[in-house]
């Protein structure tokens, strides 16, 4: 029998007398009406991320009730507690700026408060990675519950959903193809219920990735937020959390190199958000596992996009759920997966695929011989413009632009972009390459989703729908276009991107996995000497901590002091 403290005896407050510490703790909790019998059960913490500023988590009351029911039916004691809640559209300068803070909040509250396991309830883009990062560092048994996607709406008989359709209609509005009344009308229909974006944006990507990692109950990724299926998943999650506590199945047994390799396969096969790479890198870094970008690209060459969801395809998350969800996708991907990876059920991924049965006829997940795109959704680019790598979502790009050389039209920062992008006097053609600097981890700060640079208005009015764009920032997983992102090192720390000038020639070759600035090393060195980069700083507060410690995209944009002390492996592993 283990002598490790459990339940309310865990992590006693230090008063110099442990007996008194427990006595005092029980006295206060009994003030809430608990009996000794209740307090002797496994204690399961539940992160309550409900917030009026977070409509993606608008079903939190129902989820909490169902999780608590599952915990109590399984003989545990549920204890919910509030943490930071971060919403993509309500966070300035960007939700990514606050992801690491949410991870610290989650880690320290899980560590500080007595619990034998924790249920992590998250949905909006940065909440799920923040919770998995924090739980990975805290090290106790943990299970993820996704809030679920929103329902789709209808605009003039056309089915619409956030947020690929948000961008599509806004593009029409900028090009004067629709008027003020229509953009107002569609605004009422794009988000038809609470829940996360209904396409394969970052939220849906992280939901699928969490299940691929083995961190959710089977089927946990796809049920929409307002369905009975989602509530049943919540109840099952609560019950499974009690089992995790009883078995002592800690998170390090789940988040292994094999699990991360499976997650990378799924990320590629779903046409997932480019943000998924940054988040997986950060989560893995907390476990001492490096994500190998060269290995990721190798996986991408042999893993086709199979999921027919916007922006790479046509369907929405509720369609994916009706098609069997992740079980259908995993069944098709089975020959490529590490089936020995353990999941929170205590069974392997291979065993869970077998338990899911043979499936049924559907048209959302394609077979291998009829993929949406023949390679993985993401490709890793390198070259003298991005020595540390860059990412392109090739499945959502224009095939005609993926082998392209053009003239650089440079914007020094977001303010410069806003001031000039819509000017009729902007010197730009459809063959040029738009370059936006200083929107990386330190440059913005927080690496905003400004990499989805709008089509210059004069080109949009002329009918141009895509143009090559390059930046050190990110873009939403709901976005589309021939867009090179995460250029590393970023401009703000003196990366080559800082020294690109108007008129320089840039070559993009997705086939060769290259992003090259056609300027000599000598000329770049001269420019760097003439205009040395001064890294951004801050005088106080979280901004100072962020700028002093944030890492580059290839290390997950995490804080350097939060990564594991030792590196113990990598994913994908060498074969």
Image: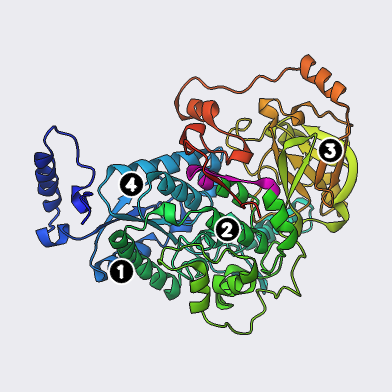
**First in sequence: mark 3 or mark 4?**
4
Give the alpha-carbon distance from disc 3 to disc 4, as whole Å.
45 Å
Q: Label 2's element?
A: helix
Label 1 sits on residue: 70
Label 2 sits on residue: 263
**First in sequence: mark 3 or mark 2?**
2
Q: Is residue 550 above or below residue 482?
A: above
Q: Label 4's element?
A: helix
Horizontal side of residue 45 vs 316, given as left or right: left
Horizontal side of residue 22 vs 459, given as left or right: left
Give the percent coordinates (x, y) of residue 240.
35, 66
* Residue at left offset 62%, top offset 63%: 199
**First in sequence: mark 4 or mark 2?**
4
Q: Label 1's element?
A: helix
Residue 287: say if magenta. yes
**First in sequence: mark 1 or mark 3?**
1
CB atoms of marks 3 and 2 within 8 Å: no
Q: Magenta span covers which residues?
A: 282-294
**Marker disc for residue 516:** 3
Label 4 sits on residue: 110
Q: Nearer the viewer, mark 1 or mark 2?
A: 2
Horizontal side of residue 321 vs 17, given as left or right: right
Q: Is residue 321 above or below residue 281?
A: below
Q: Which residue is at the front of the view, 554 or 536?
A: 554
Give the alpha-carbon distance from disc 3 to disc 2, as whole Å.
30 Å
Q: Quadrant of the N terminus?
A: bottom left
């Amino acid at each position: 029998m283990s002598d490790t403290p459990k339940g309310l005896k865990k992590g006693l407050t230090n008063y110099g007398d442990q007996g008194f510490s427990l006595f005092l703790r029980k006295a206060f909790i009994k003030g809430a009406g608990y009996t000794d019998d209740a307090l002797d059960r496994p204690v399961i913490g539940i992160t309550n991320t409900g917030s009026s500023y977070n409509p993606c988590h608008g079903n939190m009351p129902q989820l909490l009730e169902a999780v608590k029911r599952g915990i109590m039916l399984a003989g545990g004691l549920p204890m919910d507690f509030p943490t930071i809640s971060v919403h993509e559209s309500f966070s300035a300068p960007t939700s990514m700026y606050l992801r690491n803070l949410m991870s610290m909040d989650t880690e320290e509250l899980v560590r500080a408060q007595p619990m034998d396991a924790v249920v992590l309830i998250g949905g909006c883009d940065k909440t799920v990675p923040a919770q998995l990062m924090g739980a990975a560092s805290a090290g106790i048994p943990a299970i993820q519950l996704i809030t679920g996607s929103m329902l789709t709406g209808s605009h003039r008989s056309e089915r619409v959903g956030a947020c690929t359709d948000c961008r599509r209609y806004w593009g029409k509005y900028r090009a004067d193809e629709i008027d003020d009344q229509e953009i107002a009308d569609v605004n009422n229909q794009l988000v038809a219920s609470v829940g996360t974006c209904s396409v394969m944006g970052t939220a849906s990507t992280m939901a699928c990735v969490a299940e691929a990692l083995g961190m959710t109950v089977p089927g946990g990724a796809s049920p929409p937020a307002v369905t009975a299926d989602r509530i049943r998943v919540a109840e099952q999650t609560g019950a499974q959390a009690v089992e995790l506590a009883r078995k002592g199945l800690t998170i390090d047994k789940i988040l292994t190199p094999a699990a991360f390799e499976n997650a990378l396969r799924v990320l590629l096969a779903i046409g997932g958000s480019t943000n998924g790479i940054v988040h997986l890198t950060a989560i893995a870094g907390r476990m001492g596992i490096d994500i190998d970008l060269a290995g990721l690209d190798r996986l991408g060459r042999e893993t086709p996009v199979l999921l027919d969801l916007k922006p790479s395809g046509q369907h929405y998350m509720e369609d994916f759920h009706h098609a069997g969800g992740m079980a259908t996708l995993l069944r098709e991907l089975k020959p490529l997966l590490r089936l020995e990876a353990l999941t929170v059920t205590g069974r392997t991924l291979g065993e869970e695929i077998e338990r899911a049965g043979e499936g049924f006829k559907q048209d959302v997940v394609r077979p291998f011989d009829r993929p949406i795109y023949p390679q993985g959704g993401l490709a890793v680019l390198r070259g003298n413009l991005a020595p540390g790598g860059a990412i392109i979502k090739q499945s959502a790009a224009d095939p005609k632009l993926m082998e392209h050389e053009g003239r650089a039209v440079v914007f020094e920062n977001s303010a410069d972009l806003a001031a000039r992008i819509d000017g009729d006097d902007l010197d730009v053609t459809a063959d040029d390459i738009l370059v936006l600097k200083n929107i990386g981890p330190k440059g913005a700060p927080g690496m905003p989703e400004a990499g989805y640079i709008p089509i210059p208005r004069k080109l949009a009015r002329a009918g141009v729908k895509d143009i090559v764009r390059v930046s050190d920032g990110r873009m939403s997983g709901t976005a589309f276009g021939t867009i090179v992102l995460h250029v590393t090192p970023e401009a703000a720390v003196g990366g080559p991107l800082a020294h690109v000038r108007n008129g320089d020639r840039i070559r993009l070759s997705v086939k060769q996995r290259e992003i090259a600035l056609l300027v000599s090393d000598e000329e770049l060195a001269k420019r760097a000497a003439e205009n040395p980069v001064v890294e951004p700083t801050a005088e106080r507060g979280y901004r100072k901590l962020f700028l002093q410690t944030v890492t580059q995209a290839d290390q997950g944009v995490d804080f350097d002091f939060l990564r594991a002390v030792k590196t113990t492996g990598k994913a994908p592993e060498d074969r």
